[in-house]
Amino acid sequence: SLSSAWTIIEKLHDEAPSISHELSFIADQGLRDMIGLDIAAITSALQSGEWKGATILAGSCCEALLLYALQTVEGKKPGTIAAATAVLWPGKSPNPSDLTDRSWDLSSYAAVANHLALISANTKSELDPARDYRNLIHPAKVIRERASFNRGTAFVGVGAVEHIIADIKQNL
């Protein structure tokens, strides 16, 4: 019947997650789907030459992947993040008891993930330009720096995503 068909259709997703990445290492289904959808959107943006979208989404994926990795480590061994932040920032550190607090940013996540050997030093260094390019979402920054999104900014971000996935799959 038409009614049962609509019931089935309503449950379908509007977007399909990435099938190019095996993300089963992410235990949280909702987060895995979110990251998978973002990776699929990045792939589509790259194919369409939508450099801004690919660059911004890649930075977002980097942050989500690192947040997941740090939350996982903290869940397995409480106090790990507090110990790492105390070493990295002997003065004022990001809030170690809440990894979603505004005191955390991509740079902080990367520093702690590298300190805990979740990502390599090379991956951490790739995150600096990826973070800078992602911050071009702010129009004032674009004007100040006379910067723009391009194929290079997109691929720097995508490269960082790829390396984070490989590192945390191996090290988590």
Image (tube, rainbow, N blue to C red):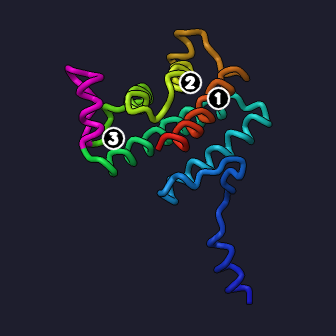
Marked residue nearer the N-terminal end (3 or 1):
3
Which residue is depicted at the point 79% across and 36% down? 48
Marked residue nearer the N-terminal end (3 or 2):
3
In this rendering, would 80 be left or right of 4? left
In this rendering, would 88 be left or right of 119? left
Query: Is 81 covered by the magenta stretch?
Result: yes
In this rendering, would 94 be left or right of 159? left
Residue at which label 2 appears: 130
Query: Can you say whether 5 is above or below 106 in the image?
Result: below
Amino acid type at mark 1: Gly
Which residue is depicted at the point 68% across and 50% down? 18
Which residue is depicted at the point 30% across and 47% down? 77
Q: Are marks 2 and 1 in contact (CB under 8 Å)?
A: yes
Amino acid type at mark 2: Ala
> Marks 3 and 1, Cα distance to the nearest angstrom?
24 Å
Amino acid type at mark 3: Leu
Q: Which mark is residue 159?
A: 1
| Residue interval drawn in magenta | 79-97
